[in-house]
Amino acid sequence: QSMGPTYARSKLSAMVHWDYINRNKTDEVDLQAVNEQDYCMQIDSHMNFSKSFDTRLIEMHHRTKNDYAVLSTYVTDIESNDQDERTVPNLCMVTFTGSIRNWGTKECKYLVRPKLTNAMWGAGLSFHRCHGELVVPVDPYLDNVFDGEEGSRGIRFFTHGYDVYTPDIVLVTHDYKTHQGNPVVHTWGRGKHNRQNEDEDLKLGEGKWKWSEEIEKSRPELSVFGTDRVNMLLGIGSHHNSTERERKELDLIRNSRFGLGTKRTMEQVREFTGIDLLNKKMESNKCGNNFWVQFEESSNYGVQEVLARGNVGKVLEPPKPEERKAEEVVLEEQKGVVPPEHVEEVVEEQKGVEPPEHHAEEEKEADQLEQELQEEDQVLKNALKQHKTAKKSKKKSILMDPNHRDMGRKKKRGVVLAAAPGDYSSPDDLLHSNRFERAKHLLDNAKPQMRHAAEVLKTKEEALLAGAVRLKEKEAEMISNGKVDYQFFGFVSVVVLLLCCYFFITSKQGGKPKRDHKKRS
C-alpha cells in the first residue's frame, strides 16, 4: 500500500497546514497550533543529532539574515557526528533519469555563514520558518515519486521567493550503512510485533486524519500524477502544452497551491540554477558563489495568496480567523490588551510616527510660511525699485548740473561748495536743484525700508534654515519608520532651496550696491 517517500512526506505538510488553519480551535488541532514564525524541520529516518542542535540551527538560520532561508543538504554519515563539524556537503549538481535528480555533492569547509546554493534542496534535512511549509508544501499527488521530489520542491521554493542555503556546520547526521543491512529495520520489527493489531495499523492512513480528507476529495479532479506531474510542472523534456487537455492540466498544476510561485520566473530559474530543464542538462557550474535574486514581497509571506489557490488550482476564499466575541474584546480592553486591529496604530505611536492629520497641519504651516515669504519678497522688490529710481534721479540731476565738475574737483581738494537756498542764476538751476532734492528724498525714504527688508530677510532666512533642518529630521525619521511622502518633501525642499538662493542673491546685489568711483560726486 506504500505510495513512496514523497507521498509520505506530504502527510506532514498537510498536518502543518491543518494545524495552521485551525490554530485558534483547540479541539481541532492535531499536534499543536502552528504560526508563520514557528520553525519547521523535515528529516529522514535513522538520524542522529549534535548537542543543542535545535538552538544552534535557529542561530544558523539567523546568520543567513534572510527570513525566507531554507537550510538543506545531504547530511553527513552518522559516524561523523560531533567529529568534523566544519566540513559540510554542498548540493549544486543534478542529473536526469525519468525526471530531475540531485547528483553527488561538493564539500564546503570553514564557512562563516550558510552558503547560498542554486536552489538545490535535499529531503534529508530541511529547516525553515513554517510559513515556508505553508507556501511550498510537499505535493500529495506525486505518487511513487523518488527522482523528481527534491528538484521540483527546490525550484518551487525559489519561485516563491525562498532561498536554499548549505548549513555552515554539521548538526544532523544519517545512518547510511547500518540500517541498510539490518533485517529488523527492513521488516519493521515484525519478530516481536503484536500481530493482533496489524490490521488496525494498516488502516492508519485510511481517512483517520481530518487533514487528509480534503486532499483525497480533490484527487478525482486530477488526471496526471507522479513523475508525469513533476515533468509537466517544470517543463522537463517538453512544454507539455501540445493538446487542449495538457494545457488545461498544466494550468491546474501550476496554479494550485502545489504549483509554481509568482516571485521569480522560470527564466530566472534557468539562469540561477544553471539547469536547462527543457533539454535535460546542466548548462553551467553553479557550485561557487551565487548572487541573490530579488523579488517583490507579499504581505504575510504570501501565505493567504497560496492557500486561496486550492488543491487543484481553483481560487477559493482565503481562510478567515474566527471572529472574536464582544465580551472577549471588552475583557481585553479592561486588561489593557490592544485589539489586533489597533496594533499597527499603537506601534506607530511608540515609534513616534505622527498620524495623517499631523501631516496636514505641517503642510498648512508650510503653505503659510511660503505665503509670508512671498509677501516679504514683494516688499523687498519695491524697496529695491525705489532705491534704483532714486539713484537714477540723483545721477541725472548731477550730470545736468554745470557745476558738478567743479564740485568734484573741490571735493577732491577737501572743499565742498553748495549753493545757498534761493541763490539760483537761472530756472534751469532751480530745476536741477529740485531733481537733486527729490532724488535725495527718495534715497532717504528708501534706506529705512531697505534696512527693514534686510532685517526681515535675515529673520526669514533663519526661519527657513531652521524649517529645513526640521523637515530634514522629520524626513529621516519617517524614512526610518517606512512612512514618507517623497513627493511632498521633494516639493517643499526644492521651494525652500530656491527661495534661499533667490534671497541670498538679491540681498548681495541690493544690500551692497557697487560704487562707481569715476562718477561719484
Image: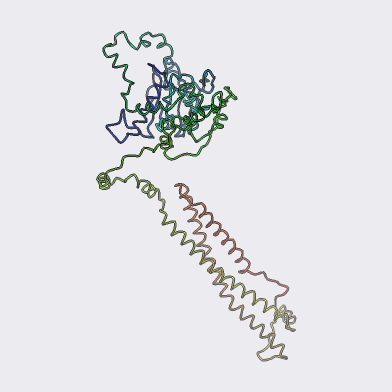
Q: How many labels does the image show?
A: 0
Horizontal side of 458 relative to 425 (left or right) equals: left
Residue 21 lies, with reference to residue 202, above or below; the image says below
Position of residue 171 measured from the top left corner of the image (x, y, whole percent): 42, 22
Q: Where is 302 relative to 424, above or below?
A: above
Q: Which quadrant is home to the N terminus? A: top left
Where's residue 340, x and y in %? 34, 44
Residue depicted at 72% across the width and 83% down the height: 401
Residue 512 location, quadrant:
bottom right
Q: Residue at x 57, y 22 (%)?
A: 280
Q: Which of 114 and 217 is in front in this view?
A: 217
| Viewport quadrant of the C terminus | bottom right
Residue placed most toward the observer, 77 or 93 = 93
The vertical placement of 161 against 203, above or below, is below
The image's colour scheme reads rainbow
Q: Which residue is more in the foreground, 52 or 15?
A: 15
| Residue in the picture at 37% in, 31% down | 17
Q: Which residue lies furthest to the front in this view?
A: 244
Q: Where is residue 88 in the image (x, y as percent from the top left)?
A: 48, 21
Left or right of 124 on screen, residue 205 = left
Return the x and y of residue 348 as percentages of the image width and height.
39, 48
- Residue 394 lies, with reference to residue 53, above or below; the image says below
Residue 519: which quarter of the image? Answer: bottom right
Q: In the image shown, does 212 or 251 lie closer to the viewer? A: 251
